[in-house]
Amino acid sequence: MPREEVINDMRILVVEDDSDMADFISDGLTASGHVVMTELDAAAGLRRAQRENCDVLVIDRMLPDMDGADLVSQMRGLGMAEPILLLTSLGAIEDRVKGLGSGADDYLVKPFAMAELGARVEALGRRGKAGLSDTSSCGSLKIDRVRREVWREGRRIVLQPREYELLEQLMRQPDQVVSRAMLLEQVWHFHFDPQTNIVETHMSRLRQKLNADFASDPIQTVRGVGYRLRSDV
């Protein structure tokens, strides 16, 4: 898909307490054709995000009134599904794990080049817009990528954002084994093994919700490898 067709008119909210940094980001993204809004703390950022229809959120980790990762968790808990990039000066693996584990879609360590931030924001925007008119079915399951909704045999199943993303990844490759490493990269954007059970924990929650009141499990565990979504269930 041509880059210009989907990424030059996004509405982006930047939550950053450093006004110079906020202006730097805003100027750079505005120059690329986007509409940029800025807020200086978590409370104002949350209110703005709830009020505006944003395509991407850029949130700093070190906000004065709340850890940015906690803000992301709060947003996800409220059902907000917008792509989120966390900015931070905390670059240790455990910091990245916490940031991405909060529900953020990407994580960028300061200092950064404006070109890299712009590319990552636009990639998130493309990902968010890619499936706007798409639905998929596999066996008894159906997902609507526009509404990020899931049904099983016509019954609506409410999932948290990461649970939905796990299922969506499996539905892209029905009846094929999707490895744990692939899920870590595609859902959490980890290019390393964080040495946690984050995949297993979210997969367990996903299964509990999908299988409530059903006798069969459409997700098959392939021991030592990953998971397969069965089309015959």
Image (cartoon, rainbow, N blue to C red):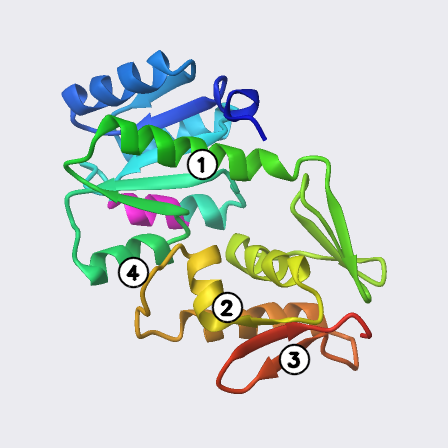
Spatial CA span between label 3 and label 4:
26 Å
Q: Earlier in the sequence, mark 4 or mark 2?
A: 4
Question: Where are the magenta residues, as a range?
Answer: 67-73
Residue 22 lies in the magenta stretch = no
Quadrant (top left, top right, bottom left, bottom right) of the C terminus: bottom right
- Structural distance between the alpha carbons of marks 2 and 1: 24 Å
Q: Please name which of the two marks, 2 or 1, marks the residue nearer to the observer.
A: 1
The label number, if any, that marks residue 202 in the structure image:
2
Q: Nearer the viewer, residue 203 or 156?
A: 203
Confirm or deny contact between disc 1 and disc 3 (CB under 8 A): no
Report whether 158 appears left or right of 50: right
Measured Cα–Cα span from mark 4 to mark 2: 15 Å
The image shows residue 33 at horizontal and vertical percentages of 42, 13
Q: Which residue is mark 1?
A: 123
Q: Which residue is mark 3?
A: 220
Which secondary structure, mark 2? helix
Instruction: State the SS at label 1.
Output: helix
Q: Residues within 10 Å of mark 2 (few under 14, many from 20)?
A: some
Q: Which comes sooner in the sequence, label 2 or label 3?
A: 2
> Does 224 sit above or below residue 89?
below
Sequence-earlier tag: 1 or 3: 1
Disc 4 designates what residue? 97
Answer whether labels 3 and 4 touch (C-beta < 8 Å). Answer: no
Residue 79 seen in the figure = yes
**Measured Cα–Cα span from mark 1 to mark 4:** 21 Å
Name which residue type carries label 2: His
Q: In terms of image quadrants, where is residue 130?
A: top right
